[in-house]
Image (tube, rainbow, N blue to C red):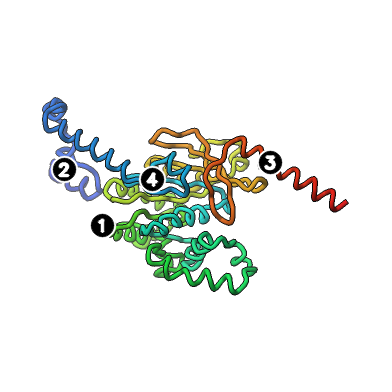
Amino acid sequence: MATLSKEQIDAQLKKAGMATTDKVDVTFDEINDFGSRESLLKMYKNIAGYNKMLGERITLINDSLTAAIPFTRENLYLFCAYTGSGKSTVAANISYPLWKQGKKVLVVSNEETEQDVLLRIACLELGFNFNDYKKGHMPNDMLRQACALMPVISQYVKVLDVSWREGLTTKIEGVKGALNALKGQGFSCVLIDYYQLIKYSITQTDRTTYDVLNDLRSWLGMYIKSSEIPVCLFVQLYSIGKRGGVKDIDARIKECSAIVEPATVIIEVVPNFDDATTDFVIHKDRFGVAGTKIVCPFEKGRYLKQISEREMAERALDKLQQGVAKAAESA
C-alpha cells in the first residue's frame, strides 16, 4: 500500500479547502502571551472600536426602535415575517428616514421591481397608500406626484431589483458581488429582500437551495465584520400553525434556520390588522433587549413610534364606540 508523505497529505487537504497541521498547531507561548502589553493594547483598541460603533448608530424606522436597538455597522439584522406580513413595507420604512437624512441605502430586491421600491418610499413621504397604486385605484394626479419624487429618492436609495442583470439578485454570486462593491462607498446600510429567494449559484448549478443559503449565511457573518455598514436581511417564516404550535423563531425560518447564528438582532414583524398596529417582537439581541415587544401604530404605510398600554386601550375603546355607532345608524 502506498504511503503519502506529509507534504502530499497537506497538498490534498489544501486542495479540499481544509487547514493543514501547520496552520492549527498551538504553542504554549501563544496561550501564555495573553495579558501581555501587546494583547492588552489590542483589547483596548477593540473596546474603543466598539464604543465608536455604538456612537455611529443611525435611525431604525422610528424613534422607539432606534432607542431600543443600536442600528450600526458590524451587525446583521434579521426581520422575519410570514408571507404578506410586511417585509417590503419594513424595508421602505427603514429606507425612508435615511433618505430624508441624506444617507445612502442599497436595496437588493429579488421580489419587487425598482419602481415599486421607490414608489413605496414616495408614498410614505406624501401620505399616500401604496396599495392603491398596486390595485390601480390611485388617481393620476397623486401618481404623478409620487413619480415626481423618484429622481430625488434615487439619488440616495439605490435599487438592484428582481430583473437586474437577468435575475442576479437571486444568485449568491450576484449578492456577494453587490455587497463587496459597497465597501468604502459611503453607504449607510444595505437591505436584502429577501433571504430565501437567493437560492441559485452561477458557478455551481447543482447546489441545493439549502447549500446556497448556508454558504450565504457563513459569508454574511464574515462580511459584517469587514464592512462599515449594517446589513438588514428579510426572512420568511413558517406560521406557528404549520410548525405545530412551535414559537421558537429558528424552528420557523424557512429553508435555512442557521441564519440565526451570525445575526446580531432578530425581529419578528407581526401585523395586527384589527387595531392597525404592528408588533416588533425582538427574539435575539446582543445589545440586551431580547424578549421585549415594541408595538407601533401603522398609518398610511408608516410605522409610528411605540404607544403605551393605556393608549392601546383608548384606541380599542374608540374603535368599539365607532362600531356601536355605525351599527346604530344601520339599524
Where residue 79 appears, as percent x and y from the top left, is 47, 47
Q: Tag 2: Cα neighbours inside 10 Å, few (<14), some, or many (≥20)?
A: few
Position of 325 with respect to 258 (left or right) is right
Q: Nearer the viewer, residue 260 or 303?
A: 303
- In this orientation, which residue lies closer to the viewer: 210 or 269? 269
Q: Identify the residue under disc 2.
A: 4
Relative image position of residue 314 (x, y in whole percent): 66, 39
- Choose top left, top right, bottom left or bottom right for residue 168: bottom left
Q: CA distance from mark 4 to mark 3?
A: 32 Å
User: SS class of the residue under badge 2?
Assistant: loop
Alpha-carbon span between mark 1 and mark 3: 48 Å
Q: What residue sits 66% from the left and 42% below the top?
A: 315
Which residue is disc 3 drawn over? 316
Q: Is residue 14 visible?
A: yes
Q: Is 51 on the left-hand or right-hand side of 326?
A: left
Mark 4 and mark 3 lie on one chain; the one further toward the N terminus is: 4
Residue 119 drawn at (x, y percent): 51, 65
Q: Rounded to the nearest whole Å, what is the CA distance between mark 1 and mark 2?
A: 46 Å
The amino acid marked with disc number 2 is Leu
Would you name the residue on which mark 1 appears?
Answer: 184
Dots 1, 2 in contact, CB < 8 A:
no
Q: Is residue 290 above or below residue 148?
A: above
Q: Residue at x 59, y 61 (%)?
A: 129
Where disc 3 sits, the SS reads helix
Pick the front one: 329 or 112: 329
Which label sits in the foreground, 4 or 3? 3
Q: Is residue 158 above or below residue 262?
A: below
Q: Amino acid at mark 3?
A: Ala
Residue 204 higher or lower than 309, as above or below: below
Mark 4 vs mark 1, CA separation in Å: 18 Å
* Disc 4 target residue: 71
Q: Earlier in the sequence, mark 1 or mark 2?
A: 2
